[in-house]
């Protein structure tokens, strides 16, 4: 792993603070295709929460919060025309995510 600034480390921790973003990253990492549809991502997120959110709420938070924040570090590329997301990876983000339990679900 390379050398990172305190700002870069803090930025990654802030991104991983949200359970949904951790789910998004893991889902994209495990995907067998280069591009994942928003509908597949929404379906996955609906299954992960303690109580399933409405599809429209998840779509809105993806478009206006989670994907733009992940795009700020170039970890994802979102194509609004095709409604697909491509995971470009981020070595630091992945290293910080690795020890976090996948089974931890936030309480309601």
Image (spheres, rainbow, N blue to C red):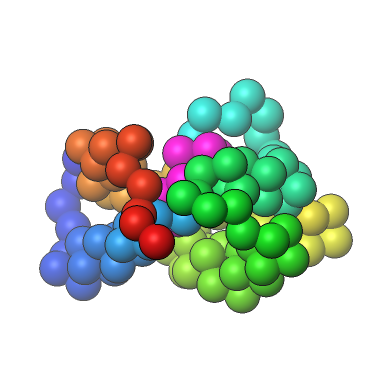
Q: Residue at x 67, y 68 (%)?
A: 57
Task: Give the residues drawn in magenta, as a range.
Answer: 21-28
Q: Is 18 drawn above or below residue 30 in the view shown? A: below
Q: Is residue 22 left or right of residue 92?
A: right
Q: Position of residue 5 (x, y in %)?
A: 17, 65
Give the farthest residue toward the top.
32
Q: Residue at x 46, y 50 (%)?
A: 50
Q: Position of residue 1 (x, y in %)?
A: 20, 40
The one nearer the camera, 89 or 47, is 47
The one nearer the camera, 81 or 54, is 54
Q: Residue at x 40, y 61 (%)?
A: 108
Q: Position of residue 104 (x, y in %)?
A: 31, 43
Q: Is residue 69 left or right of residue 35?
A: left
Where, by quadrant of the figure, is residue 98 drawn?
top left
Report if residue 57 lies within the magenta region.
no
Report whether residue 68 is seen. Answer: no
Report if residue 24 lies within the magenta region.
yes
- Give the main secondary structure of the magenta stretch: helix
Q: Position of residue 88 (x, y in %)?
A: 52, 45
The one nearer the camera, 87 or 39, is 39
Q: Residue at x 34, y 36 (%)?
A: 102
Report whether residue 4 is seen. Answer: yes
The image shows a total of numbered marks equal to 0
Give the farthest residue toward the bottom.
64
């Amino acid at each position: 792993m390379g050398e990172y600034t305190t700002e870069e480390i803090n930025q990654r921790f802030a991104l991983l603070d949200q359970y949904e973003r951790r789910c998004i990253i893991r889902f994209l990492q495990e995907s067998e295709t280069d591009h994942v549809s928003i509908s597949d991502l929404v379906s996955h997120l609906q299954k992960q929460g303690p109580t399933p959110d409405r599809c429209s709420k998840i779509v809105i938070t993806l478009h206006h919060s989670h994907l733009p924040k992940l795009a700020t570090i170039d970890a994802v590329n979102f194509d609004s025309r095709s409604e697909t997301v491509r995971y470009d990876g981020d070595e630091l983000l992945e290293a910080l995510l690795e020890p976090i339990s996948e089974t931890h679900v936030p309480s309601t």
